[in-house]
């Protein structure tokens, strides 16, 4: 039952996310590392603030220790990018992070990273699933945690300073110090509080924080930085007269932003802003990468600078692979994950936040002003996002209708192309598009539609709702 989706293995706690399954997965990775002859270097493990995350990390470490593979454990809850950074910097072949990212609080999971600090790709995760199927000696052997520590097979580390220094060295701290910025922070009860505060206060920013305490229920909300979940941050930014507000998801690899006017900036806007800034103001050269559910406005910006924007399936492993292949400046997704060239090979909400603060300091403009400048120059696009839940029978019916028989509703727009790269995507001649696909992290059908007008995007989603009877 252990299956990897677009963001690692995620499951409901007590259902499939159990000690037995965690240790089966760990044993499978042990077997894979031994066969690849990389077991001697060990593995890096981290965890977030979710229920059972620390225990799950320790249960995994006990299996590695029993198999003679040294486990380096980050001994405090930390952002996922810290694990990716440490795997990359110290040339480990494997790392693991216990997190379910932005999923509801009843979920937990494990992300696996490979050499270079990359998300394990489809080939790697398929191989891991094969090794899982070969694990037959259950319960899996493990070493008591205290014995692992005493023997040196488990070592507790805390590499946060090394990670933070890499970001501080990469951004223009001098310019930020001159700006006297006030920043509102919302860690969403997750793991970004220490990291973001350290960077911002080192740059002499005033920091106003909410939701920093440890709460495994995330305040009763989804730990994803969306317009619905960041209303408290919007009020906080206005009340405290902040230059911007920054939020991160549960494991701090995704970002949400509130501008100086208290407006929620969609992750699509953030991606476009950062690419525009890196090319126009920092003089970088290179393409951009986005997934199929992310704004085509990024394509327009890239084209205006003589660059290309590449489209890939959903799943950050596809983005990071394409970035590596094309030497892209930036890659991102409409859910708030983005990576920037020269840093780790995956999404990092901490680094993206630092770059946004730098952008305000360097340009001398408010965030709302920069966004308005981009909209005037490139035009605007409106995105409609809808999620649907249903039983397995209905799911199979939709899959057969849309993806196997490839039946489509009557479409009142001129169609330029239809793609089945990842679910269904219809491209319109006027630049609009609609994507219909099953989530790789939750039991959902997701529809994304981008049009020039919000009402048209809502209408196009409604056509599919009626056609699919959802």
Image (cartoon, rainbow, N blue to C red):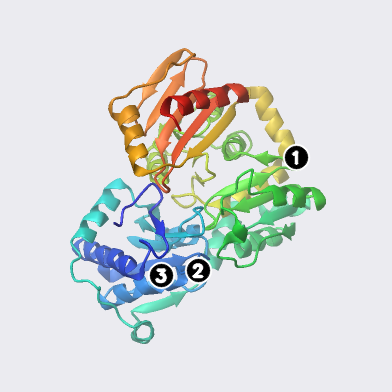
Distance from the alpha carbon under mark 2 to that under mark 3: 20 Å
Lower position in the chain sequence, tag 2 or tag 3: 3
Residue on which disc 2 sits: 159
Lower position in the chain sequence, tag 2 or tag 1: 2
Distance from the alpha carbon under mark 2 to that under mark 1: 34 Å
Quarter of the image with the N terminus in it = bottom left
| Contact between labelled residues 1 and 3, with CB atoms less than 8 Å apart | no
Q: Secondary structure at mark 3?
A: helix
Give the crowd class for mark 1: few <14, some 14-19, many >=20 residues within 10 Å. some
Location of residue 22 in the rendering, given as x and y in whole percent from the top left corner: 34, 66
Residue on which disc 3 sits: 56
Give the crowd class for mark 3: few <14, some 14-19, many >=20 residues within 10 Å. many
Location of residue 219 in the rendering, given as x and y in whole percent from the top left corner: 62, 60
Say left or right for 33 vs 115: left
Q: Which residue is at the front of the view, 435 or 322?
A: 435
Q: Secondary structure at mark 2?
A: loop
Residue on which disc 1 sits: 366
- Which residue is rendered at x = 63% and y = 22% of the image? 379
Q: Which mark is residue 271?
A: none
- Which residue is rendered at x = 37% and y = 87% of the image? 150
| Contact between labelled residues 3 and 2, with CB atoms less than 8 Å apart | no
């Amino acid at each position: 039952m252990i299956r990897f989706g677009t963001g690692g293995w995620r499951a409901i706690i007590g259902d499939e996310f159990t000690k037995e399954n965690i240790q089966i997965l760990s044993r499978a990775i042990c077997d894979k590392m031994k066969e690849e002859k990389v077991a001697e270097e060990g593995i890096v493990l981290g965890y977030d603030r979710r229920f059972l995350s620390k225990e799950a990390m320790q249960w995994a470490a006990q299996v590695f220790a029993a198999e003679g593979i040294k486990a380096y454990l980050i001994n405090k809850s930390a952002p996922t990018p810290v694990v990716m950074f440490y795997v990359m910097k110290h040339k480990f072949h494997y790392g693991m992070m216990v997190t379910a990212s932005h999923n509801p609080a009843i979920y937990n999971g494990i992300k696996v990273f490979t050499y270079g600090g990359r998300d394990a790709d489809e080939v790697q995760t398929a191989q891991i699933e094969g090794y899982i199927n070969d694990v037959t000696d259950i319960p899996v052997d493990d070493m008591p945690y205290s014995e692992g520590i005493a023997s040196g097979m488990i070592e507790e580390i805390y590499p946060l300073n090394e990670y933070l220094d890499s970001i501080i060295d990469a951004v223009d701290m001098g310019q930020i110090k001159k700006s006297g910025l006030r920043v509102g922070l919302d860690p969403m009860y997750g793991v970004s509080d220490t990291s973001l505060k350290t960077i911002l206060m080192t740059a002499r920013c005033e920091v106003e924080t909410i939701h920093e305490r440890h709460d495994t229920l995330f305040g009763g909300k989804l730990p994803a930085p969306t317009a619905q979940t960041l209303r408290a941050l919007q009020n906080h930014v206005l009340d405290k007269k902040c230059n911007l507000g920054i939020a991160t998801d549960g494991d701090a690899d995704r970002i949400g932003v509130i501008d100086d006017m208290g407006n929620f900036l969609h992750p699509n806007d953030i991606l476009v802003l950062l690419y525009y800034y890196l090319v126009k103001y920092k003089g970088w050269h290179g393409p951009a990468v986005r997934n199929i559910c992310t704004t085509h406005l990024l394509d327009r910006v890239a084209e205006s600078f003589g660059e290309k924007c590449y489209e890939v399936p959903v799943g950050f492993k596809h983005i990071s692979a394409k970035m590596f292949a094309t030497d892209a400046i930036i890659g991102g997704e409409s859910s708030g994950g983005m990576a920037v060239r020269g840093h780790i090979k995956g999404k990092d909400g901490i680094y993206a936040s630092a770059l946004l603060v730098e952008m305000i300091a360097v340009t001398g403009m408010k965030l709302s002003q920069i966004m308005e400048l981009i909209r005037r120059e490139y035009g605007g696009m409106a995105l409609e996002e809808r999620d649907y839940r249903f039983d397995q029978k209905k799911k199979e019916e939709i899959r057969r209708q849309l993806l196997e028989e490839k039946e489509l509703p009557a479409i009142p727009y001129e169609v330029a192309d239809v793609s089945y790269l990842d679910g269904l995507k219809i491209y319109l001649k006027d630049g609009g598009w609609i994507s219909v696909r099953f989530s790789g992290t939750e039991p959902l059908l997701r529809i994304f539609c981008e049009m020039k007008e919000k009402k048209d995007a809502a209408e196009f989603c409604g056509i599919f709702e009626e056609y699919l009877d959802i």
